[in-house]
Image: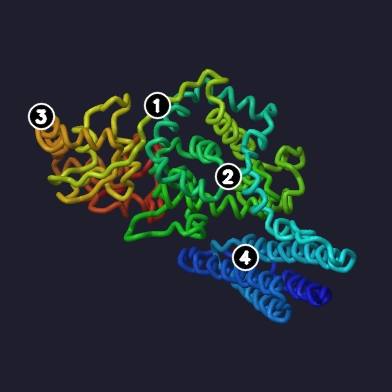
Amino acid sequence: MPFRLLVAIATLLLAGCAATPSAKSARGGRVDESAVIAIQAEIDRAVTQGEEGIRRYRDGEPEVAADLFGQAREQLTAIAGRCVAMPGCEIERVLLAQDTLLDRQAQELLGRARVDAVDADDAGAPEGAGAGTIEHALPETSRTAALLQGRDLRKMVALNEPIRAALEEWLTWMRPNLMETYENYQYMRYKMFPAYERAGLPEALLFGILAKESGGKVHAVSRAGASGPLQFMYYTGARYGLGKDGGFDQRFDPALSASANVAYLNDQLRLLNNDLELVLGAYNGGEGRMQRLSPHGRSRFWDPKVQGRLPPETREYVPMVLAAAWLFMHPAEYGVEFPAIDGRPARITLAQPLSLNELSICLGQGGTPRGWFRTVRNLNPRHDPNLRLPAGTMLELPVAAAAAYEATCKGGPLLAMSQQLHEARDPVVPAAARVAQSGNTHVVRRGETLSSIARRYGCPTVKPIAAANQIKPPRYAIRAGQKLAVPSCRA
């Protein structure tokens, strides 16, 4: 293999990095979300082209490989120039893509040099003498294989002081959250675990992230706008295929969010030398920050030089995830008794119009102390629970809830009562009184939405309240305890 040609390829790609404009350029202005998503897709395509260059080099086509790397370099350089001038564009992602390609190329260069040396010095060596080269270039492959061969999370997690402190949190005041997460997860397991199973990732890790991120509540939204059971930010979710489908935010889909989570973790495991703690730190605190603090995973997450430059939230996040995962694997050792839950899925077809609220009521309690509402919503995230769904709508339920539907939701007193409750309305306030209330401050209560607040004050849409409080579409995110200025509205 022409060793010098691959060095020349490296020089080309390094030149592309040097030509990248400074990330400090002023980029104020309105964010064009579609343009940002489009530029992220271009980055992915350029990286894919660089990866193809590696494959073609392995196949003995060095000239083609050089051409592919040159094209990838030019694309990333052009993307960087547009990104620095685009509000909301993450220049760090462009730089990370360039750095990743260089790293992958360097791994292949070293691996190929080893193979060439074996060929030269050990002619006639038995078959397999050069084994291990591909695993060196693709560390996630050996990592997955090791897990499949029995190297599970127990051997990857060291119970240090931060993790022990996190264990105490989960076993005391956060124990109800741990148990609730377990119940929610068992009903969603058939949607979420297959992605982890295919990737060779441990189920305990999925549970740990779920416990810390959302408690297994599919429609959870953080103050920062992270959404869904695994709490993807909008742009990160879009990068990993979680977009809008007919107005539905796919971050709320448990199966799709689990697949995106796997893709993200695998990307970061490759970039951060398979260091699980660093990867979890990137998931919470940002991949750019973690790459800066530990380029290619050279420093451990627990290194004081890394810890001292992390925000408190990330320092707390990583041990909390690992502690929850540890309890998932070792419940009996810590006096934890996870409930036996029949999470087998079933489907029903509505025999008459019914909302998810009505369905949850007429199902009764069915042996679950918290009732079925959370599970019904988690398994059917696309439907607004307040709106009646037409007869013939297919819904997913656990087998026990599906049996309860047949018994109590096709007729009888529970169905009648749930419909009566659904049709109940707050007293109608005269228009003059509603106008008199407006112009005040409203304190958001738990469970309220901007739409419900707008209706309460007689606003025909959420826009006047959103504009008065600088609440941005499309999520119009608010939180309990937030004070809203309510302008004058007329019905």
Classed neighbour count for the residue bearing mark 3: other residues with Cα under 10 Å, few (<14), some (14–19), many (≥20): few
Q: Which of the pair 485/163 is nearer the observer?
A: 163
Q: Which residue is mark 2?
A: 284
Q: How many marks?
A: 4
Kind of element beneath mark 1 = loop
At x 65% / y 66%, what residue is drawn?
A: 25
Residue 344, placed above or below residue 244: above
Q: Is residue 367 left or right of residue 24?
A: left
Viewer-nearest of discs 1 and 2: 1
Q: Are marks 1 and 2 in contact (CB under 8 Å)?
A: no
Kind of element beneath mark 2 = helix
Real-space Cα distance between discs 2 and 3? Answer: 48 Å
Where on the picture, by quarter, is residue 85?
A: bottom right
Q: Amino acid at mark 2?
A: Asn
Q: Amino acid at mark 1?
A: Ala
Q: What is the number of the mark on residue 340? A: 1
Q: Which residue is mark 4?
A: 26
Query: Which of marks 4 and 1 precedes in the sequence?
Result: 4
